[in-house]
Amino acid sequence: MMREWKWLILTAVSIGLLVFFGSSGNVLHQSNGKTNQPPTEISDQTHVKATEPVQSDSSSAKQATSKNAKQATSKNAKQTKPLSFLLLGVDQRGDEAGRSDTMIVVTVNPNTGESKMLSIPRDLKTEIIGVGSNDKINHAYAFGGPEMARESVEHLLDLRIDYFAEINLEGFTDLVDAVDGVTVKNDINFSYYEMKFPKGQVSLNGKEALAYARMRYDDPRGDFGRQIRQRQVVQAVTDKLTADFSLTRFNDVLTVLGKNVKTDIPFPVVRKLATEYRDSLKEVETLSLDGSGGIEADGIYYWHPTDTSLKQVRTTLQQELN
C-alpha cells in the first residue's frame, strides 16, 4: 500500500509539472507576439497530428491497413476518453480556509495527442456557485473548498471538470528547500518584503522562491508576470530533480508533497495518465483570456474577460472534451 501511495504522489506531481509547464515536451503558446505583455489572442483551432500514409503497391494492402487503423482508433477512443483537471495553488495560513491564488484548467485528449492549459486570473469576477453572488473567482475556494471552486469554474467555462489537485503554496517553500534551492533568470528588477531580486541570474532558497513567485503589484504584467515566475521556479525544481536525483532527495520531496498535496484523482486514473495519456502530455498548448480590470463601486479591483475571448476559450476546451 505504501508503495502505491508513493507511486500515486510522485506520478501525479510529475504529470502536473508536465501539464503546468511543459517540462518534458513542447509548449505551444497562444499570444499576441508582444514581448513582456500579457497574451491577448487565443486560437480556437485544434491541432491534430497527421499520420504518414503507408506506401504499398497493393490496393488490398492499403485497404486492410486503413481498416485496421480505423478499428484501432475506434477502440482507443472508447478506452481513453479525454479528461479535464482543475489544478489549484492554495494560499492557506494556520486554520484559515485559504484562497486559490493559482487556478489552472487542463484538458488531456489522447485522441488528438495534445493537452490544453488555461490559467484563470485570480481577480476574474464571476458567479460563485453555491453563494449566489458575483465575486473574485479565487474566493470560491475560501467559501466552499475545492468543490465550490470546481463548480464555479465549470459554470464560468461551461465545461465539466473531472478531477482536482491542489498544493498549499506554503509547501512550495519546502519543495524548493528539498532540492537545495534553485537558480532562475529574472527579467525585471524588484523588491518584495525586504527581499531584493535583481535582474539576471538569481539563486533562491525556499522562502525567496515563494516571494519571487508571488510578487505581482510591481510587475507591469500583473498576474501574467507572476505566472511566468511561477513557471520558472517549478521548471527549475523539475530540472534539479532530473539532473541530480538521489534517494534522500526523492524521500524529502515525497515528504513535502505528502503534507501539501490533496487530490481526488484515483490511483487507476493516475496509472492511465502515466501510460495511455502520456504522449498527450508532451504537447501542451497554453490558452489565455483577454480582458481588463479596475476598481469598482465597492472599492475592490476586479478583472473581466472580453465576451469574444471567453467564448473562444470555451469553444476550444469543449471541443477537446467531445
Image: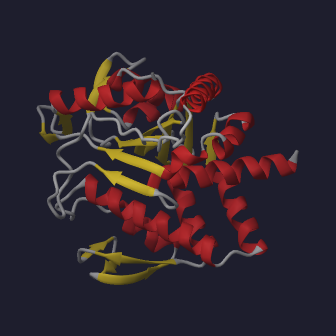
Above or below 234: residue 100: above
Q: Give the quadrant of residue 208.
A: bottom left
Q: Residue sitting at 20 percent across and 38 percent down?
A: 302
Instruction: Compare residues 320 and 50 and report the one nearer the observer.
Output: 50
Q: Is residue 180 visible?
A: yes
Q: Position of residue 287 (x, y in %)?
A: 31, 43
| Image quadrant containing the N terminus | top right
Instruction: Compare residues 123 and 121 and report the one nearer the observer.
Output: 121
Q: How many marks?
A: 0
**150 left or right of 7 in image:** left
Q: Give the quadrant of residue 289.
A: top left
Q: Is residue 104 visible?
A: no
Instruction: Compare residues 157 and 27 and report the one nearer the observer.
Output: 27
Q: Position of residue 213 (x, y in %)?
A: 39, 63
**300 left or right of 66 in image:** left
Q: Position of residue 164 (x, y in %)?
A: 55, 35
**33 left or right of 205 in image:** left
Above or below 73: residue 178: below
**37 left or right of 19 in image:** left
Q: Residue sitting at 73 percent across and 46 percent down?
A: 8
| Image quadrant containing the C terminus | top left
Q: Position of residue 165 (x, y in %)?
A: 57, 41
